Image (tube, rainbow, N blue to C red):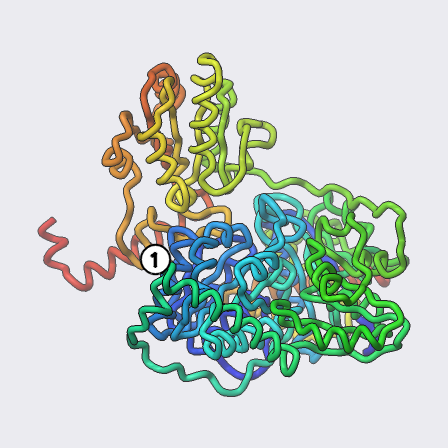
């Protein structure tokens, strides 16, 4: 509990990177952790590269994940994997968009939540806090779709872990 | 965040925390002009039920705020760092006056220029204008120091600047709001001519009063200011402000750390005592070496940072480098994909025409500044809000005729209201020999900062209908010779033909290129329908008669 967990979520503007980090930060907050989340708004939203840092633990100081100290890097867009890889610590985990096949989701717009599902398999945040955070951060009409995406991502991560 | 104030803890951005504190502080009016990273403060204040307004620009926002404070109301005025340049004129004399209600001015600085044209350090304004300045390190302090800023403002009847930076504005951290919301007294006017009318006879004693106020606040800051010492070994002492304080705590958890919450006037005796207990003293501050120089002037020697750290944000890694005197070149982060004009954005067509016509384009601040990047590369200057018109005119005045005739000023709708109208007056008053062409790219919103309303949209910050400025009527009334509106449904080649014609005349021209922002269009339709529905509900017969 003393160790700070560092997550970086990256992608392109419009993919839901910031929404995903909002949900992650909210879930960690609901689980009772100290949480900090940081990103830059503005120009980056015009289709450019976007990334967001979420850190949680007993006590977090800086809101930014230092380069080379991320435990997990979640990337929503294949082209953004290499430019963000440097944030990972040695042995850190990469969750890329290839985890979820092209026609698996009803809409690719829920890829952000699907990859959170995969991330959830690696973190000590109880499932009920994830569910609550997803519902609190998305419109009601999107709940079912995203609940399914989350479950699918979680299962995909479990499957990959078994295969490996 | 929740829609109503509640006193359980919440995960809030710095901007949201300031808005919540403003609500709890009993703020009666919030004014400002949108600008990253400050925009969300007034939007959140409005969403929480506060009364918030976008002004045409920051100068007007501060003047409205000042009037409200003279009237006895607690007032919040928000802007980005460069906005304070625009509002500097009222600021430098507002400090001479005695306020009745508290006035807190939020200056959101952008070290690293995530979304700005410069990385000026607005701590200089605190000293230059003699304004107390508070600097939070996270959202909790953003909340606490906003409340404190109102108390200081009212106690000494002086405006207070709350200086925040991009990382504080846009980082979310946990906030535990305070217990009792402030009940501010009803506004009412009390005449106090010598303290509010700054003619020399009254301003001379007012300046002396201001310096006495700052001296008294310095004493208070030493005695009970929002400054905090984290204990640690005496080998290394760190004095830090703003976000640098949390980086410092992480990079050097065993060092003694003094965080200074009120950075003007400084708590020099507190700092001196802290310095005496440290073998090595390092000042960590983003931007210019303001604090370290002030300590030097006060006879408190401290290490600053090497010049290379003046540029960009500080991070935990950069703080480690400063502390260990690491002079090796910093790693250059890989370049991401740059932003671009949206697919379907109406600005695209305009910049294709300007590029193909080889125009010399004096540009301005907004989404359309992206017209400088490939595939357009159709912008030749961009300096500050409204500069497109003056710069375009200056170029026209001095360039040889064949070049002068290619100069076009390009400005957005919100930017035009902010600082373009005086440029138009200049064009009418001092027309270049070749005339000039100004284009307003009117996409019906302040798109860059997230689609805020402005006086040209005819809707308030809350998206309710209000008075609307018509650019073409305004230009005609001011005496611009040719005024045209081009819609993007217009036939292919319309804009090109029109520009060719206007550039060949030696007359003053304004072209309004009008098409709603693709991102804002659905919302604009929604607001318009809501307004029409309300009107019909209120007065069905009148609509039927039309």
Percent of width and height locating residue B52? 39, 65
Relative to B355, is B66 above or below?
below
Percent of width and height locating residue B324? 89, 59
Q: Chain of mark 1?
A: B
Is residue A113 or residue B406 the one in the foreground? B406
Residue at x 33%, y 50% (from the top left corner): B455
**Dot 1, crowdedness within 10 Å: few (<14), some or many (≥20)?**
some
Q: Quadrant of residue B297?
A: bottom right
Percent of width and height locating residue B88? 48, 54
Q: How many marks?
A: 1
Residue at x 35%, y 23% (from the top left corner): B491
Horizontal arrangement in the rendering, residue B192 relative to residue A76 (left or right): left
Q: Secondary structure at mark 1?
A: loop
Residue at x 45%, y 18% (from the top left corner): B404
Is residue A163 or residue B238 the one in the foreground? B238
Percent of width and height locating residue B3? 46, 74
Horizontal arrangement in the rendering, residue B504 relative to residue B334 (left or right): left
Residue B489 seen in the current view: no
Horizontal arrangement in the rendering, residue A76 relative to residue B393 (left or right): right
Relative to B163, is B5 above or below?
below
Residue A145 seen in the current view: yes
Residue at x 33%, y 26% (from the top left corner): B509
Is residue B54 or residue A82 the one in the foreground? B54
As drawn, the residue found furthest toward the bottom would be B179
As drawn, the residue found furthest toward the top would be B402
Q: Quadrant of residue B266?
A: bottom right
Which residue position is annotated with label 1? B460
| Image quarter in which the C terminus of chain A is found | bottom right
| Image quarter in which the N terminus of chain A is found | bottom right
């Amino acid at each position: 509990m003393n160790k700070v967990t560092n997550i970086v979520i990256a992608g392109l503007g419009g993919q839901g990177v910031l929404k995903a980090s909002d949900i992650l930060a909210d879930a960690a907050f609901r689980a009772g952790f100290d949480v900090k989340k940081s990103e830059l708004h503005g120009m980056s939203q015009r289709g450019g590269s976007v990334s967001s840092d979420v850190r949680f633990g007993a006590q977090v100081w800086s809101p930014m994940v230092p380069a080379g100290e991320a435990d997990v890097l979640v990337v929503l867009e294949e082209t953004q994997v290499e430019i963000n890889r440097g944030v990972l610590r040695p042995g850190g985990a990469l969750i890329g968009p290839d985890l979820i096949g092209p026609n698996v989701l009803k809409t690719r717009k829920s890829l952000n939540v699907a990859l959170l599902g995969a991330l959830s398999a690696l973190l000590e945040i109880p499932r009920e806090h994830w569910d609550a955070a997803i519902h609190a951060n998305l419109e009601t009409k999107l709940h079912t779709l995203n609940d399914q995406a989350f479950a699918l991502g979680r299962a995909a991560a479990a499957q990959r872990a078994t295969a490996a | 965040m929740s829609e109503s104030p509640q006193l359980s803890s919440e995960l809030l951005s710095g901007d949201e925390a300031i808005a919540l504190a403003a609500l709890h502080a009993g703020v009666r009016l919030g004014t400002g002009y949108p600008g990253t990273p400050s925009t969300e403060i007034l939007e959140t204040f409005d969403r929480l039920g506060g009364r918030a307004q976008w002004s045409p620009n920051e100068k007007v926002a501060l003047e409205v705020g000042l009037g409200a404070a003279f009237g006895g109301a607690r007032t919040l005025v928000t802007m980005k760092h460069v906005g304070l340049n625009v509002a500097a004129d009222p600021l430098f004399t507002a400090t001479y006056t005695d306020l009745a209600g508290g006035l807190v001015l939020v200056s959101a600085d952008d070290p690293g220029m995530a979304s700005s044209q410069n990385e000026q350090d607005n701590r200089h304004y605190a000293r230059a204008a003699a304004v107390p300045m508070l600097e939070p390190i996270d959202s909790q302090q953003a909340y606490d120091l906003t409340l404190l800023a109102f108390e200081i403002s009212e106690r000494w009847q002086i405006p207070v600047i709350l200086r925040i930076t991009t990382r504080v504005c846009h980082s979310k951290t946990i906030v535990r709001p305070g217990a009792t919301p402030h009940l501010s007294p009803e506004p009412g006017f009390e005449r106090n001519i010598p303290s509010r009318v700054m003619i020399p006879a009254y301003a001379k004693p007012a300046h002396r009063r201001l310096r006495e106020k700052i001296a008294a606040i310095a004493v208070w800051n030493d005695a009970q200011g929002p400054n905090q010492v984290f204990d640690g070994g005496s080998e290394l002492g760190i004095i830090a402000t703003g976000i640098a304080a949390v980086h410092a705590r992480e990079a050097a958890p065993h060092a003694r750390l003094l965080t200074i919450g009120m950075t003007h006037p400084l708590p020099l005796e507190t700092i001196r005592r802290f310095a005496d207990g440290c073998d090595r003293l390092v000042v960590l501050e983003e931007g210019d070496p303001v604090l370290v120089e002030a300590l030097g002037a006060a006879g408190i020697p401290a290490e600053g940072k090497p010049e290379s750290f003046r540029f960009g944000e500080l991070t935990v890694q950069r703080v480690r480098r400063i502390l260990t005197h690491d002079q090796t070149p910093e790693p250059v982060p890989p370049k991401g994909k740059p932003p671009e004009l949206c697919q379907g954005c109406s600005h695209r067509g305009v910049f294709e025409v300007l590029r193909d016509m080889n125009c010399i384009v004096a540009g301005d601040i907004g989404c359309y500044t992206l017209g400088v990047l490939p595939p357009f590369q159709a912008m030749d200057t961009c300096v500050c809000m409204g500069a497109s018109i003056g710069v375009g005119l200056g170029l026209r005045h001095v360039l040889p005729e064949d070049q002068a005739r290619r100069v076009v000023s390009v400005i957005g709708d919100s930017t035009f209201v902010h600082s373009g109208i005086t440029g138009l007056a200049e064009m009418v008053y001092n027309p270049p020999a070749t005339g000039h062409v100004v284009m307003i790219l009117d996409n019906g919103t302040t798109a860059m900062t997230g689609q805020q309303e402005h006086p040209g949209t005819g809707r308030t910050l809350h998206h309710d209908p209000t008075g609307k400025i018509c650019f073409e009527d305004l230009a005609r009334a001011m005496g611009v010779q040719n005024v045209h509106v081009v819609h993007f449904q217009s036939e292919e080649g319309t804009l090109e033909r029109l520009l060719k014609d206007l550039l060949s005349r030696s007359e003053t021209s304004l072209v309004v290129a009008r098409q709603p922002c693709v991102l804002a269009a659905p919302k604009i339709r929604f607001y318009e329908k809501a307004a029409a529905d309300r009107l019909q509900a209120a007065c069905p017969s009148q609509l039927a008669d039309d």
